[in-house]
């Protein structure tokens, strides 16, 4: 009997140890909060996720401050819903650890009720930072032009829907700009694709620096680029900025001891006030303006919009 009891006790200890090891390997911890006093209880796994010293007092107000603003709002809404309805909730939340590191966790919340009223909530917290980073890396790869590092056409299409909901909001965007390099095929044919790639990368860097406050700068493909311009909003000022862009892009670049000449033609569709313009209409107008710029001799800017049709700049 004693031997059987010892074996049973050992089995329980092994079971607990294996359980703890599995939770630690999965970076999961358990938590509980008494609703009347807001007293928190954590297992070691939660301390590890928050990077929080075990010796520090657990005060809910201090822990809530570690949540990023949007995640804090989502967590508080979910918490209130669980307390109200009694139905469990799971959500992903972004935090800053006690030492300031960015981290993502999956938070589950459930409620215990006594006499029909909630008395405490509990659940688990799992570190999913590596999973989020892997997903973000895949997303960036899918949305980034591998040569220039700019957003690609897929990102452009997704972004304008996100920003404008298929209509450009006049309060956040002033123009859709299309840019095409002049004589790029000839440069490729004369100096080779490596020189052409170097030219595209240099143009991308110049556009990134010049339009760092733009809604989006992307490479549509080949030698075509697009910009969703937020500011300026005045048509004359937009024309001036784009003319400066033409001048900036016409500066030669040097590659492998070669002097490579490059220039660009620009077409822009202005977003009138207070109208809301569909992106397909704006894209068609910007394309017409770009064609006009090339037909006028290239290295030109043309603007089309409600506040002045087919303006030269």
Image (cartoon, helix red, strand yellow):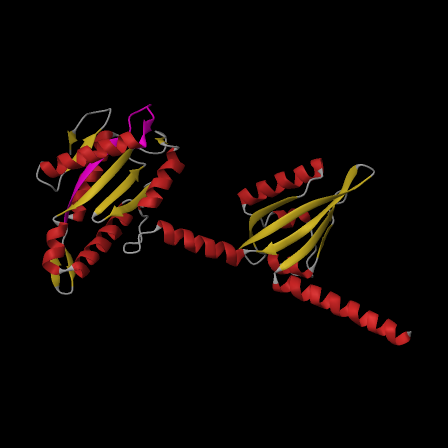
**Where does the N terminus fall, quadrant-wise?**
bottom right
Q: Is residue 162 left or right of residue 18?
A: left
Q: Residue at x 50, y 54 (%)?
A: 132
Residue lying at the far bottom of the rendered structure: 3
> Looking at the image, can residue 101 be seen?
no
Q: Is residue 126 above or below residue 8?
A: above
Left of 6 or right of it: where is 41?
Answer: left
Compare residues 273 and 12 and report the one nearer the observer: 12
Residue sitting at x 21%, y 42%: 179
Q: Nearer the viewer, residue 34 or 223?
A: 223
Where residue 205 appears, as percent x and y from the top left, is 26, 52
Using the image, determine if residue 166 lies above or below residue 154: above
Residue placed furthest toward the right: 1
Report whether 25 appears left or right of 293. right
Q: Residue at x 28, y 41 (%)?
A: 227
Q: Position of residue 25 (x, y in %)?
A: 62, 64
Q: Is residue 308 above or below residue 50?
A: above
Q: Quadrant of residue 87?
A: top right
Q: Which residues are magenta?
A: 261-279
Tell whether position 271 is magenta: yes
Q: Is residue 130 above or below residue 4?
A: above
Q: Foreground residue, 154 or 205?
A: 154
- Give the quarter of the image for residue 216: top left
* Residue 232 x %, y %: 28, 35
* 272 magenta-colored: yes
Rendered image quadrant of residue 235 = top left
């Amino acid at each position: 009997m004693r031997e059987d009891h010892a074996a049973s006790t050992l089995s329980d200890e092994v079971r607990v140890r294996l359980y703890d090891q599995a939770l630690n390997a999965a970076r999961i911890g358990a938590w509980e909060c008494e609703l009347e006093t807001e007293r928190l209880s954590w297992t070691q796994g939660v301390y590890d996720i928050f990077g929080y010293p075990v010796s520090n007092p657990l005060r809910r107000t201090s822990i809530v401050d570690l949540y990023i603003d949007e995640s804090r709002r989502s967590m508080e809404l979910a918490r209130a819903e669980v307390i109200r309805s009694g139905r469990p909730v799971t959500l992903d939340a972004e935090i800053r650890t006690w030492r300031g590191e960015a981290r993502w966790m999956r938070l589950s919340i459930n409620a215990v009720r006594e006499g029909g009223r909630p008395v405490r909530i509990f659940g688990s917290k799992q570190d999913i930072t590596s999973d989020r980073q892997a997903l973000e890396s895949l997303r960036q790869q899918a949305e980034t032009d591998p040569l220039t590092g700019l957003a690609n056409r897929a990102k452009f299409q997704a972004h304008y829907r996100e920003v404008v909901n298929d209509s450009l909001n006049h309060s956040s965007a002033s123009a859709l700009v299309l840019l095409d390099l002049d004589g790029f095929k000839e440069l490729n044919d004369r100096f080779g694709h490596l020189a052409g790639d170097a030219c595209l990368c240099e143009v991308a860097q110049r556009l990134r620096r010049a339009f760092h406050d733009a809604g989006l700068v992307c490479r549509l493909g080949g030698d075509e680029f697009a910009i969703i311009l937020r500011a300026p909003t005045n048509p004359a000022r937009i024309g001036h900025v784009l003319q400066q862009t033409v001048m900036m892009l016409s500066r030669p670049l040097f590659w492998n001891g070669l002097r490579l000449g490059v220039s660009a033609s620009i077409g822009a569709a202005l977003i009138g006030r207070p109208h809301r313009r569909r992106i397909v209409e704006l894209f068609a107008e910007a394309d017409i303006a770009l064609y006009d710029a090339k037909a006028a001799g290239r290295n030109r800017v043309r603007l089309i919009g409600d506040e002045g049709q087919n303006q030269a700049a």
